C-alpha cells in the first residue's frame, strides 16, 4: 500500500511493514494510539542521532546536511540501525543498544549483581550475554558457609526466571546467551541443560571451544577439565566423546552452538583491557564485560544498478558504508546507557557493528545462485570492500573527533596503524524485524520461502509471494495463484515443472542449499568481519549426526568464529505441518448434524443425569484459571464451568457468563473450532506467559483449553503439555523452517540467524 505523508515524501510501504512499524516502533499516546508516521519516526531518529556532531563543534550547515543524509538512508530503507535505536532515539528512555555482555564472578554478590543488571538491561530493550565459566563446579565446597556450590547450570535457571519476569515494555522480550568453556568441570551437564528445553527457555547456549580441544578431537586424545576456582585439573575426558555429545544435542534440537573462543580473542582489539569470554544472544558480537555494541545493516538490495544486465553500484555502497559508520558512531554519544559501567566501557572502545541484509535479494537481482562459486567470490569482494571503506571512514572520524580512548593499548597501535575512531567496525547481525521493515531478505541468509501463507490460520489462505519471484513469474508468463499455492505447499520450486529451470537455480531457498554452502558463505563473510557472523546452517530432517559434525569441523577449518545449526523439525515444540485440504477441517459430529437437520430451529441437547470431564489449570495475568469441561454419555462436549482462584464480583460473573454461552454453543452443535475462533486472541490489560507463549486474557486461555481438550470433537482425558496442543499450533504450513507460533498474531515462527522470527508481525525472540 502507498502511505501518503502530509509533507514532501511518499512511502511505498507494504501492509506488513506498516503493521510492524505501528505495532513496535511508531510513537503512541498514553492510550496506545499511534501518533507518529513512518516519516516522523525517521525524522525523529535522524535528528536525534545527528545531535552528536554538535558535541565536536560541527556547524549548523554541517548538522543540517548530516541530518538530511541520515534521513535519506533511513527513509529509502537503504540502512537500518538495530531496533532499540529506532524505538528509543529521541524518546525519554533513550537506550539505543541491542547487545550487552555482563560479567559473572564466583561469588553470590557478583551473581546477583549480574541478575539485577540484567533486569535493568532487559527493561530498556537490550539482550545480554554471560560466561558462566568462572563459577566453581557443582558440589564444590564454599569455605565461607561450609556448604557446596550449586554450579553454573543451577544459576542459569535463576537468570532464566528473572528474564521471564521482566517484560520489555511490550516491544521486546529478554534474550540471553549462556556460555561455558569446554574445559569447565560441569561441561557435560551444561551441554545437556536444554535437552528437554523446558527450564532454560530464555537462553541460547554455546560452548566456548578452544583450539587445544579441537585439535585433540581431531587427534582423538584426552583433554583436561580445570576447576576455575583453584585452576587445578579435576579430571580428563576424551575430547571426541565430548564433541560427539555436542553434535548429538545440536542435531536433536539445535543447541548448544559453538564459539571458537581462542579465535575470538586472537582478534580482540584491546587485550590489555581483558579477555573476551562471551557474546551477545545471537553470537555475532563478542564483547568484553560491561561492553555494549550498536549494530546497523546496509540493505544490499538497494545497491544494484543497470537497466539491462544488473551490477553492484559500488559508489552507492561506499556512500552507505561511510554514512552507516558515522551514524553508528554517533549513537554511542547519544545513548542513554542502563549502567554507568557499560557507558564507561563502551566509550573507551567505541565498538560498532556495521553489517548487511538483503544478500539473497542482491544475488537474485544479479542472477547468481546462492550456492555457487560466483556467489562466494562476490561475497568476498563485497565484504572486503565494506571493511576497507569502514576503516577509511573511521580514520576520518578519528581525525575530527579523536580515536577511541584505548587506542594506544590496542593491537592497531602496535601495528603502526593510523588512529581509528572505533575498536571494531563490522558485524553480520540478525536482521529479523528491520529486514521486514526494509522488505529485504534477512542478513546473509538465503530466502526461507518464495510463497507462503502469511496468515496461515485464515480461511481465505492469504498468500505472501516473494516480490522478486512474482515479478519474474509475471514477466515470463508462468504466474498463477494455483502455482503460488503449490509452491507454498512444497516450500520450494525445485520439483515444480511449471517453473523454468533457469529460475530454479536462482530462486533457491534455505533447504535447497546443501549445508556446506551455508558454511562456505559464513566463512567468506567472516574473513572480512571484525566481530562475528550470525548465520544458521539449515539441515533437512533426515540429516545425520555425521552431517552436523562435518559442518562443525568445516567451520573450524574455514575460520568461522562460531556456528549454529538447525535441523528441520528437531525441536519438539515445532508446529505440526498440517495439510491444508478439506480432510483436516473439523466437522460437526455426524450424530449431532443429523439431529440438527431434523429441527427447523437450533435447540440445545437435554442434559443427561450424569456428566464427567476434566479440569485444566491455566495461569493468567489475573490469577489461576480452572476450566472444567464435561461430556455427555457419548463422550461429546456438553458444558463448561470456569472458576478463578480467589476471584469474586465482576470477574466471577463474567467467567460464569462465558461458561454458560460456551455450554449453550456446545449443546447446540456449534463447531468447537468456531467457538475457539471467537474467544482466541481477546486481550486484556494483564497478559501472562505460559511455556507456550503469551496468554492474552481469560478468554484466550479458555480458547486454548478448548482446543487442547476438544481438538477432534471428542474429549481428551490424558494429561498433555498445553504448549504442545495450543490452538496456535494448528497451523497449516509446509515450510520446514517453522519452529513455533507467534504469541502476538498466531502466524508461523521461523528459525533465522539464531532467533525465532515472525515475518507476519515482526515479533522476534533470540
Image (tube, rainbow, N blue to C red):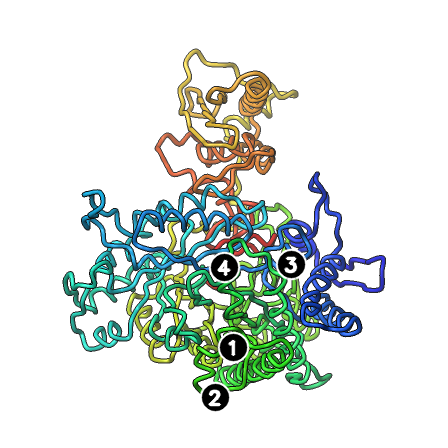
Q: Quadrant of residue 527?
A: bottom left
The residue at which mark 2 appears reads as 416
The residue depicted at 24 percent of the width and 77 percent of the height is 215
The residue depicted at 47 percent of the width and 82 percent of the height is 412
Residue 748 position within the rendered picture, expressed as x and y whole percent measured from the top left: 53, 52
**From the viewer's perspective, is residue 713 above or below residue 319?**
above
First in residue order: circle 2 vs circle 4: 4
Query: For numbered disc 3, what is the local secondary structure?
Result: helix
Residue 485 appears in view: no
Residue 661 position within the rendered picture, expressed as x and y whole percent measured from the top left: 59, 22
10 Å crowding of disc 1: few (<14), some (14-19), many (20+): many
Q: Which mark is residue 370?
A: 1
- Front of the two marks 1 and 3: 3
First in residue order: circle 1 vs circle 2: 1
Quarter of the N terminus within the rendering: bottom right
Residue 677 position within the rendered picture, expressed as x and y whole percent measured from the top left: 58, 36
- Distance Cα–Cα, label 1 vs label 2: 38 Å
Residue 398 position within the rendered picture, expressed as x and y whole percent measured from the top left: 59, 79
The residue at which mark 4 appears reads as 342
The residue nearer to you, when weighing 169 against 764, is: 169
Label 3 with label 2: CB-CB less than 8 Å? no
Label 1 with label 3: CB-CB less than 8 Å? no
Q: Quadrant of residue 77?
A: bottom right
Residue 131 appears in view: yes
- Distance Cα–Cα, label 2 vs label 4: 29 Å
Query: For numbered disc 2, what is the local secondary structure?
Result: loop
First in residue order: circle 1 vs circle 3: 3
**From the viewer's perspective, is residue 519 above or below residue 46?**
below
- Distance Cα–Cα, label 1 vs label 4: 39 Å
The residue at which mark 3 appears reads as 86
Amino acid at each position: 500500500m502507498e502511505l501518503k505523508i502530509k509533507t514532501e515524501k511518499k512511502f511505498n510501504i507494504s501492509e506488513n511493514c506498516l503493521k510492524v512499524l505501528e505495532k513496535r516502533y511508531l510513537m503512541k499516546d498514553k492510550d496506545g494510539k499511534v501518533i507518529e508516521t513512518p516519516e516522523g519516526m525517521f525524522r525523529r531518529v535522524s535528528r536525534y542521532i545527528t545531535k552528536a556532531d554538535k558535541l565536536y563543534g560541527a556547524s549548523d550547515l554541517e548538522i543540517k546536511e548530516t541530518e538530511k543524509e541520515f534521513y535519506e538512508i533511513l527513509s529509502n530503507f537503504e540502512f537500518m540501525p538495530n531496533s532499540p535505536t529506532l524505538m528509543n532515539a529521541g524518546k525519554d528512555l533513550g537506550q539505543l543498544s541491542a547487545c550487552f555482555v555482563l560479567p559473572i564472578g564466583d561469588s553470590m554478590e557478583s551473581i546477583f549483581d549480574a541478575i539485577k543488571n540484567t533486569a535493568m538491561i532487559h527493561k530498556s530493550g537490550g539482550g545480554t550475554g554471560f560466561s558462566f565459566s568462572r563459577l566453581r563446579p557443582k558440589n564444590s565446597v564454599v569455605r565461607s558457609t561450609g556448604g557446596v556450590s550449586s554450579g553454573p547450570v543451577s544459576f542459569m535457571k535463576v537468570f532464566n526466571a528473572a528474564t521471564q519476569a521482566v517484560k520489555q515494555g511490550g516491544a521486546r522480550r529478554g534474550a540471553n546467551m549462556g556460555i561455558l568453556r569446554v574445559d569447565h568441570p560441569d561441561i557435560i551437564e551444561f551441554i545437556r541443560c536444554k535437552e528437554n528445553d523446558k527450564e532454560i527457555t530464555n537462553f541460547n547456549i554455546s560452548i566456548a571451544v578452544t583450539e587445544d580441544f579441537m585439535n585433540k578431537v581431531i587427534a582423538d586424545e584426552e583433554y583436561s577439565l580445570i576447576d576455575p576456582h583453584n585452576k587445578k585439573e579435576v579430571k580428563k575426558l576424551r575430547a571426541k566423546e565430548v564433541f560427539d555429545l555436542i553434535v548429538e544435542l545440536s542435531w536433536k534440537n539445535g543447541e548448544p552452538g559453538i564459539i571458537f573462543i581462542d579465535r575470538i580473542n586472537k582478534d580482540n582489539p584491546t587485550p590489555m583491557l581483558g579477555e573476551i569470554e562471551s557474546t551477545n544472544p545471537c553470537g555475532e558480537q563478542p564483547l568484553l564485560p560491561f561492553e555494549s555494541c550498536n549494530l546497523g545493516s546496509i540493505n544490499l538490495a538497494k545497491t544494484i544498478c543497470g537497466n539491462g544486465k544488473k551490477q553492484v553500484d559500488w559508489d552507492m555502497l561506499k556512500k552507505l558504508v561511510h554514512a552507516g559508520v558515522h551514524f553508528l558512531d554517533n549513537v554511542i554519544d547519544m545513548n542513554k546507557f542502563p549502567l554507568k559501567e557499560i557507558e564507561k566501557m563502551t566509550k573507551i572502545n567505541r565498538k560498532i557493528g556495521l553489517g548487511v541484509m538483503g544478500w539473497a535479494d542482491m544475488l537474485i537481482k544479479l542472477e547468481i545462485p546462492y550456492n555457487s562459486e560466483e556467489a562466494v567470490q562476490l561475497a568476498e569482494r563485497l565484504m572486503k570492500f565494506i571493511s576497507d571503506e569502514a576503516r577509511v571512514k573511521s580514520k576520518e572520524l578519528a581525525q575530527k573527533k579523536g580515536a577511541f580512548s584505548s587506542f594506544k593499548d590496542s593491537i592497531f597501535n602496535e601495528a603502526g596503524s593510523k588512529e581509528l575512531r572505533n575498536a571494531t567496525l563490522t558485524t553480520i547481525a540478525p536482521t529479523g524485524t528491520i529486514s521486514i521493515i526494509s522488505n529485504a531478505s534477512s542478513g546473509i541468509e538465503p530466502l526461507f520461502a518464495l510463497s507462503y501463507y502469511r496468515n496461515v490460520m485464515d480461511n481465505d489462505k492469504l498468500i505472501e509471494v516473494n516480490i522478486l519471484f512474482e515479478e519474474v513469474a509475471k514477466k515470463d508468463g508462468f504466474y498463477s495463484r494455483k502455482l503460488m499455492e503449490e509452491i507454498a505447499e512444497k516450500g520450494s520450486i525445485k520439483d515444480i515443472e511449471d517453473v523454468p529451470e533457469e529460475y530454479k537455480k536462482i530462486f533457491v531457498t534455505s533447504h535447497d542449499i546443501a549445508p556446506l554452502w551455508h558454511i562456505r558463505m559464513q566463512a567468506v563473510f567472516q574473513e572480512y568481519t571484525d566481530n562475528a557472523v550470525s548465520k544458521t546452517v539449515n539441515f533437512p530432517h533426515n540429516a545425520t549426526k555425521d552431517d552436523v559434525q562435518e559442518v562443525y569441523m568445516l567451520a573450524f577449518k574455514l575460520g568461522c568464529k562460531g556456528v549454529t545449526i538447525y535441523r528441520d523439525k528437531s525441536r519438539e515444540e515445532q508446529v505440526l505441518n498440517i495439510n491444508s485440504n478439506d480432510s483436516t477441517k473439523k466437522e460437526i459430529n455426524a450424530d449431532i448434524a443429523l439431529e440438527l437437520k431434523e429441527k427447523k430451529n437450533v435447540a440445545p441437547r437435554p442434559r443427561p443425569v450424569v456428566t464427567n470431564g476434566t479440569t485444566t489449570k491455566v495461569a493468567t495475568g489475573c490469577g489461576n484459571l480452572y476450566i472444567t469441561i464435561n461430556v455427555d454419555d457419548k463422550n461429546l462436549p456438553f458444558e463448561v464451568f470456569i472458576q478463578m482462584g480467589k476471584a469474586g464480583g465482576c470477574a466471577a460473573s463474567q467467567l460464569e457468563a462465558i461458561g454458560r454461552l460456551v455450554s449453550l454453543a456446545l449443546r447446540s452443535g456449534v463447531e468447537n473450532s468456531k467457538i475457539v475462533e471467537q474467544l482466541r486472541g481477546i486481550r486484556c490489560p494483564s497478559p501472562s506467559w505460559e511455556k507456550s507463549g503469551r496468554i492474552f486474557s481469560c478468554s484466550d486461555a479458555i480458547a486454548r483449553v478448548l482446543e487442547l481438550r476438544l481438538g477432534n470433537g471428542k474429549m481428551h482425558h490424558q494429561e498433555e503439555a498445553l504448549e504442545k496442543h495450543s490452538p496456535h499450533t494448528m497451523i497449516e504450513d509446509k515450510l520446514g523452517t517453522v519452529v513455533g507460533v507467534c504469541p502476538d498474531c498466531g502466524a508461523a515462527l521461523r528459525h533465522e540467524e539464531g532467533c525465532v522470527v515472525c515475518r507476519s508481525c515482526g515479533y522476534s525472540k533470540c
